[in-house]
Structures are given as C-alpha cells and as structure tokens.
Amino acid sequence: MLSIGQLAKRIECPVETLRYWEKEGLLPAPYRGDNNYRWYQDSHLERALFIRNCRNLDMSLAEIRQLLRYKDQPDMRCDQVNRLLDEHISHVTERIASLTLLKDTLESLRQRCVTEKNIDACEILAGLSSDQTQGSTEKCSSHLRGVHPGSGRSI
C-alpha cells in the first residue's frame, strides 16, 4: 500500500492533483486507515499513471473519464477508443492552427517596431489599441485563451 505522498511521487504529480482526480471520480476512493490517511493499492497506481499520461496528451477530464469507462469494459471493441482519439486529434489540429495564427499575428505586431523609440511612438502599443491587430485573429477567440470553441473543454 502507498500513502498519497508516495503515490504522488511515483507518478510525478502533486498530491493535490490526486485528491482532485479522486473528487472528480477518476480515481476510486482509497482505503482509509484509522488515522483517516489515504492508502492506495497497485490498482490506484496503474489508474493514476493512465490518467497522468492522458493529461500529458492534453486530454480533457471528460475524454479521460470515457477512456476509463472503456478500459473498465475489456470485452468491448476498441472502435469507440479510436473515435475518441480521432476527435482529440482533430481538436489538437484546430488548436495548432489557432496557435500558428496567433504566432503569425504576434510576429507581425513585433515587426511594427524594429527601432527603439519613445513609448508614445511605439507601434506595438499603437497596434494593440487598434482594430488592425484584432482583425488578424478571431475576434474574442475563446480557444486562444484555453477553452476549446464550442465544447467548453480546457485545452
């Protein structure tokens, strides 16, 4: 059996993350000793590694929850897993396109000021105050701020 600190160390994530996964129902509640300490078994370690690896692949908690449901049904065919992963790849592709556009916009903005000037003549600050910069990216683009458009899923 592992304490929460030992489990966190084994999977290289903070203790708070394990508590959060438990609260979200991704990680089953561990055995609690008389002192109310959490004690985790090897099955918790395996599941926590699975969750951590999914998070490292930028999967949402909803996607991980679904993958865990599939994992808990070993007789099921894996076509559902393939579909989920294909959807995730699509989200990642969209995100890459958005980030590429963001990078291009930032580089364009940076090119406005190639010599040192006084702040009141700074073309970057002027560009950030105009419609010109906003027009080169999506207006109020939620996915550039960390939420995938239309899904509410964190990216």
Image (tube, helix red, strand yellow):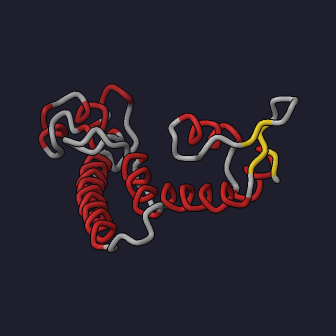
Front residue of 78/127: it is: 78
Write the residue at 28% across / 45% down. Answer: 148
- Give the answer, above or below, for where 50 lies relative to 112: below
Q: Position of residue 48 (x, y in %)?
A: 61, 55
Snapshot quadrant of residue 4 = top right
Write the residue at 32% across / 48% down. Answer: 110
> From this viewpoint, which residue is outermost toward the front?
75
- Give the answer, above or below, for where 34 lies relative to 29: above
> Is residue 2 rendered to the left or right of residue 16?
right
Snapshot quadrant of residue 84 = bottom left
- Give the answer, above or below, for where 137 lies relative to 98: above
Number of numbered labels in the structure image? 0
Q: Position of residue 87 (x, y in %)?
A: 25, 61
Front residue of 38/89: it is: 38
> From this viewpoint, which residue is outermost toward the right?
35
Front residue of 120/5: it is: 5
Write the residue at 40% across / 49% down. Answer: 60
Write the residue at 64% across / 43% down. Answer: 18
Q: Position of residue 151 (x, y in %)?
A: 24, 42
> Is residue 82 rendered to the left or right of residue 134?
right
